[in-house]
Amino acid sequence: MSFDTLGLSAELLRAISEQGYNEPTPIQRKAIPVIMQGKDVMAGAQTGTGKTAGFTLPLLQRLSTNPIKNGCRPLRALVLTPTRELAAQVGDSVKTYGRHLPLQSAVVFGGVKINPQIDKLRRGVDILVATPGRLLDHANQKTVDLSQVEILVLDEADRMLDMGFIHDIRKVLALMPANGARQNLLFSATFSAEIKQLAGRLLNNPELIEVARRNTTAEKIAQIVHPVDKNRKRELLSHMIGSNNWRQVLVFTRTKHGANRLAQQLEKDGLSAAAIHGNKSQGARTRALAAFKRGEVRVLVATDIAARGLDIDQLPHVVNFELPNVPEDYVHRIGRTGRAGNKGEAISLVCVDELKLMRDIEQLLKREIPRVVLEGYEPDPSIRAEPIQQGRFGKGQPRTQNATHNRGRSSAKRPFASRGKSGNAPARQQRRTRSGRNQVKAA
């Protein structure tokens, strides 16, 4: 099947051809016709399989075939994403595929100055891609009007719930036309009971689209576990990168402090490295990512904020320096490699403290991941497991909600910055792990 069998306009087909794409992916084949019919959709696909184009293309088609005729340019489509990186990626897709259409788009997120965004919105946009916090900033300042939105997309909806954005989502919905007066699209790499509950409130008789068993990883990603003592992980990582001459490696840590420390240690080992996480300014994150893509930085160390929205062409290696607290995040981390049908390798360095986390991941995937003990790095059997510390607050001390509260907001350094007339930002829901405990993951 080719794209021209999906009923897309000549302008969209031209843009697709210019990107070098010939055949739609499974999620695109199934989602595009349904969305073009105006139906609500709940869609899930493995990360890296083209789901962004799966909603971007039909969205552009619907808006371009039903133009506003009175000369004004109201906001007609809204795409909500959990992170700045994902918002930027979706915004790029909208511009790329809509380059031959008379539609205007904008991207708004926190961490950057708001005035240029206000100027863009005042000139009029048809499509807005936004993080929830910065969108509400604009709504409070009356610089955006959501009353005429025809299409709402929640991208990576499970991540938005994980990050505690449900209250912001409800506020955004209250500013929009009634549920039955708009088309609602919910896209996610994973489905959960919470996602189904949200879909039940948001969607009207939706079409359920799944192209693979939920919570699975791409088949072309080779996964392997290297058991190793915690205090030798950095040594082993440097050894693997150097001895295998890896030129581009994305490494995940559990905390922001850990990402900074590891990047500094790798630099001392002679490996060019940079860290990106929620405490970095948007400019610093953008520069680090650009340098990594250009090959100027060999190792990019990231927290789970980068597990969604990082689209790096043909990224060969992903390393879990530390396993995530939540098994679903493993799926999104390693989904940065093996994208668009390319092969990839996902390596996890697992110490005795993380064996329970590894079992939870394998239970989610319904498969065992091969273990390979590397010579010279055999784990010490006398070392006993210790509780995993949550962030930099130490053992036994609960994490505050600040880490997730401000992701995508302009007030990232002010955890309780005022929000509109209320004077306080809404309290975030704490993240619930599979064990049932309330935790918030460091980012």
Image: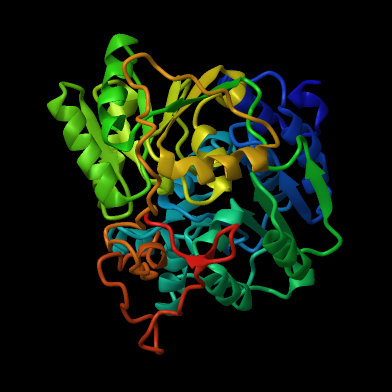
Determine the residue positioned at 52% across, 45% down.
Answer: 357
Q: Position of residue 188 (x, y in %)?
A: 65, 48
Residue 361 is left or right of residue 186, and the answer is: left
Give the total number of marks visible in the rendering. 0
Determine the residue positioned at 81% across, 53% down.
Answer: 38
Determine the residue positioned at 25% across, 52% down.
Answer: 281
Above or below, 233 against 240 in this view is: below
Determine the residue positioned at 33% across, 69% down.
Answer: 397
Among the 4 quarters of the image, the one containing residue 197: bottom right
Above or below, 261 against 368 in this view is: below
Among the 4 quarters of the image, the one containing residue 69: bottom right
Q: Nearer the viewer, residue 106 or 272?
A: 272
Q: Position of residue 64 (x, y in %)?
A: 68, 46
Q: Nearer the viewer, residue 426 or 129?
A: 426
Residue lying farthest to the left in this orientation: 268
Q: Position of residue 56 (x, y in %)?
A: 63, 43
Residue 81 is left or right of residue 281, and the answer is: right
Q: Name the quarter where the N terminus is drawn.
A: top right
Q: Position of residue 352 (x, y in %)?
A: 42, 39
Residue 187 is left or right of residue 333, and the answer is: right
Residue lying farthest to the front in this orientation: 382
Among the 4 quarters of the image, the one containing residue 260: top left
